[in-house]
Image (tube, rainbow, N blue to C red):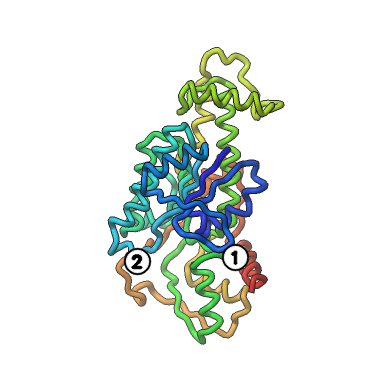
């Protein structure tokens, strides 16, 4: 597949880049800002015609949308811009994929929850109850994508960190190395997500989606693509000399097999992904300091109201990952194991 990655110079995009060469796919990495040493094409995804032009010029078959307005606090004062990036831009990408029969993988957030009290992990089918502009605009983006009718996989994630950009892990590494004491909230519960783990999961999902598209073509099942597009794909398959089908053809495929169609369709929709386990921000900070060897910093738990904010953050946003694990066969690492890897990598870089 020819895949467009938006927001490619952010945390997740930077983690996707090193996985691209061995993926079997061709990638076009885009952003609105340059990054030193990274090949990047400029693309403003709030511009519908620019998106269409890029898709046409590059022959894009799938989009991974890593771009978003993610500053939770400033979003409260910038609703229009946050909505443009988090709702309108994803809709632009969805429309472009719908027009060519492509796939959109869109990254969303645990912040679509929070308005209702939860004490069990949030499932995909739960009604969104955002408490701030960031969560509201991300939820609107999900709804806009679904309304286009394009093939889509929306992945809600939480507490993202990596070796790149600004994130909680890197901030705590700096603070615990320089401050004698810190206070960190213990009454917000969730699960950290190592961006590298999420990037690897996306690659597995892409492979599944590609096989599903092939399966649809091989068995003459209905799809979002036009008959002309399907014929073009069949011709492309012939010219690439694919030696065998990715999945067996139906014994009798003269008529659409509804059970096969159900198997094909079920991979699309909303999923949840974070690392395994549960913790508070306080626990997260303690483990960061421990793995980094910053034992002299005294980290104390505190309540959220000790840090006044315009945003009411979710008190409990642990994500239930049963669906994504069962659908794509994912084995998700425990959060402390991934945290240790990230900190080791950061220490090697230094």
Q: Position of residue 163 (x, y in %)?
A: 57, 65
Say which of marks 2 and 1 sits in front. 2
- Residue at (56%, 81%) from the top-left corner? 177
**In the drawing, does residue 50 fall left or right of residue 284?**
left
Q: Mark 2 points at which residue?
A: 73
Q: Mark 1 points at which residue?
A: 339
Q: Where is residue 194 in the image (x, y as percent from the top left)?
A: 56, 60
Residue 191 appears in the figure: no
Please report whichever mark, 2 or 1, sits nearer to the chain's N-terminal start. Answer: 2
- Residue at (49%, 22%) from the top-left corner? 228
The image shows residue 337, relative to residue 286, as above or below, that is: above
Calculate the distance from the C-alpha at mark 2 to the C-alpha at mark 1. 25 Å
Q: Position of residue 33 (x, y in %)?
A: 46, 59
Nearer to us in this view, 181 or 232: 232
- Location of the C terminus (image quadrant): bottom right
- Circle 2 Cα neighbour tier, 10 Å, few/some/many (<14 / 14–19 / ≥20): some
Nearer to us in this view, 215 or 52: 52
- Circle 1 Cα neighbour tier, 10 Å, few/some/many (<14 / 14–19 / ≥20): many
Among the 4 quarters of the image, the one containing residue 188: bottom left
Nearer to us in this view, 128 or 101: 101
Report helix, strand or loop for mark 2: loop
Residue 206 appears in the figure: yes
């Amino acid at each position: 597949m020819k895949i467009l990655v938006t927001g490619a110079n952010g945390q997740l995009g930077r983690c996707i880049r090193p996985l691209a060469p061995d993926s079997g796919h061709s990638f076009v990495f885009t952003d609105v800002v340059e990054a030193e040493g990274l090949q990047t094409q400029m693309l403003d995804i709030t511009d519908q015609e620019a998106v269409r032009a890029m898709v046409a010029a590059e022959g894009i078959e799938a989009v991974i949308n890593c771009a978003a307005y993610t500053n939770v606090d400033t979003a409260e004062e910038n609703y229009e811009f946050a909505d443009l990036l988090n709702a309108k831009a994803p809709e632009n990408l969805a429309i472009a994929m719908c027009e060519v029969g492509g796939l959109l993988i869109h990254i969303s957030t645990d912040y679509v929850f929070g308005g209702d009290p939860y004490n069990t992990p949030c499932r995909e089918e739960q009604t969104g109850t955002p408490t701030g502009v960031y969560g509201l605009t991300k939820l609107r983006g999900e709804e806009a994508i679904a309304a286009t009718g394009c093939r889509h996989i929306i992945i809600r994630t939480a507490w993202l960190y990596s070796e790149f950009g600004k994130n909680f892990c890197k901030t705590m590494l700096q603070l615990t190395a320089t401050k004698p004491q810190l206070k960190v909230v213990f009454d917000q519960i969730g699960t950290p997500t190592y961006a590298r783990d999420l990037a690897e999961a996306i690659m597995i999902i892409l492979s599944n989606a590609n096989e599903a598209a092939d399966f649809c073509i091989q068995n003459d099942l209905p799809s979002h693509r036009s008959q002309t597009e399907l014929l073009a794909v069949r011709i492309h398959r012939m010219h690439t000399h694919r030696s065998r089908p990715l999945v067996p053809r139906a014994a009798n495929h003269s008529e659409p097999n509804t059970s096969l169609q159900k198997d094909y369709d079920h991979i699309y929709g909303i999923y949840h992904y974070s690392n395994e386990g549960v913790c508070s921000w306080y626990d997260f900070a303690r483990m960061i300091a421990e793995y980094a060897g910053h034992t002299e910093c005294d980290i104390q738990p505190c309540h959220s109201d000790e840090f006044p904010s315009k945003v009411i953050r979710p008190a409990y946003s642990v994500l239930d990952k049963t669906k994504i694990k069962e659908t794509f066969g994912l084995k998700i690492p425990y959060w402390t194991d991934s945290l240790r890897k990230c900190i080791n990598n950061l220490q090697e870089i230094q």
